[in-house]
Image: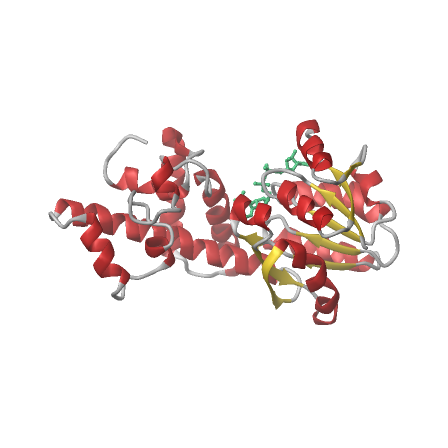
Amino acid sequence: MTRIAFIGLGNMGGGMAANQAKAGHEVSAFDLSAAALQRAVAAGCTAAATAGEAVEGADVVITMLPAGAHVRAVYANDVLPRAKAGALLIDCSTIDVESARAVAAQAVAAGFRFADAPVSGGAAGAEAGTLAFMVGCVEADFADIEPVLEPMARAVIRAGDHGAGQAAKICNNMVLGVSMIAVSEAFALAEKLGLAPDKFFEIASKSSGQCWSLTSYSPWPGLVETAPSNRDYEGGFATTMMLKDLKLAQDAAAKAGASTPMGAQAEALYALFDRLGAGGKDFSAILQLLRGEAP
Ligand code: NAD
């Protein structure tokens, strides 16, 4: 049994902490939201009064927070001053590469082992324990990190050194944002050309247009049973979250001097869709914008 401190129990962290408790670990949990904390207690975790209290005595500290500023603050105020010597620190939030590397450097300077380990798989994957983890860590530390993540994972892949997990996450989600727009544009064009959407789907699924956004997550309703398009674009991966990741990719590209014109265009389209009030809808609802429908 491992003593795990879990900080950030929202849509993602709630299910992840519950799976650690289910695996038999002692989970000391904290969230600023009393409701989130209560849900974690109902799932077998112990409530801590503060993030610092949760961290005290833990073998592993896992954070699942909204953005880089939250992670930097929780590390500076609670994790680094209160973690016990030798504790393994793992941040699973999706944050900017710069913050991940800054926090890693502070953790290492204070004598801790650290990993940035953002995830893919959404709230459903967090609940089911089937997330994909992209890990940035020192190579020698990976053997200890992998089993800790296992109760929450279907795949744990080391991407490289500190920050590489975040780099993998934003590059992957840039592909996803761009490909969802491309698929949605194709459906909208097929419709205008009088080609039935289900015929286009059948043909492109077996042709070179095949991709995850088409065959696993079709934005056109009625083609992929589990896709949010069949639930009026409820649940799934919100437009605001996709926009956050596309912004992280653009910021990183600007700093690294990388050319990402399709990523920039995807960010602009999702920003427009968000301004039109569709921030809470699944990101595949971008089809509505491209068909000229009000969101
Ligand atoms: P969320 O807003 O549901 O949860 C974040 C939680 O952090 C909230 O409960 C909030 O109260 C808590 N929090 C904020 N500041 C805190 C602090 N100082 N101390 C303790 N708790 C604090 O967000 P989420 O959907 O769970 O996402 C968490 C992270 O996972 C984000 O970085 C997000 O980009 C990433 N992510 C989300 C998804 C998804 O589908 N939701 C998928 C992959 C990755």
Residue 152 visible somewhere in the drawing? yes
Residue furthest out toward the bottom: 140
In this rendering, is residue 142 above or below 16?
below
Give the x, y percent position of residue 98.
62, 54
Q: How many numbered badges does the structure rendering display?
A: 0
Give the x, y percent position of residue 235.
46, 38
Give the x, y percent position of residue 117.
63, 56
Front residue of 267/172: it is 172
Q: Quadrant of the C terminus?
A: top left
Residue furthest out toward the left: 194
What colouring does the structure picture have? secondary structure
| Residue located 70% across and 67% down the image | 142
Front residue of 286/143: it is 143
| Residue located 35% across and 35% down the image | 232
| Residue located 12% across and 48% down the image | 193
Residue 255 visible somewhere in the drawing? no
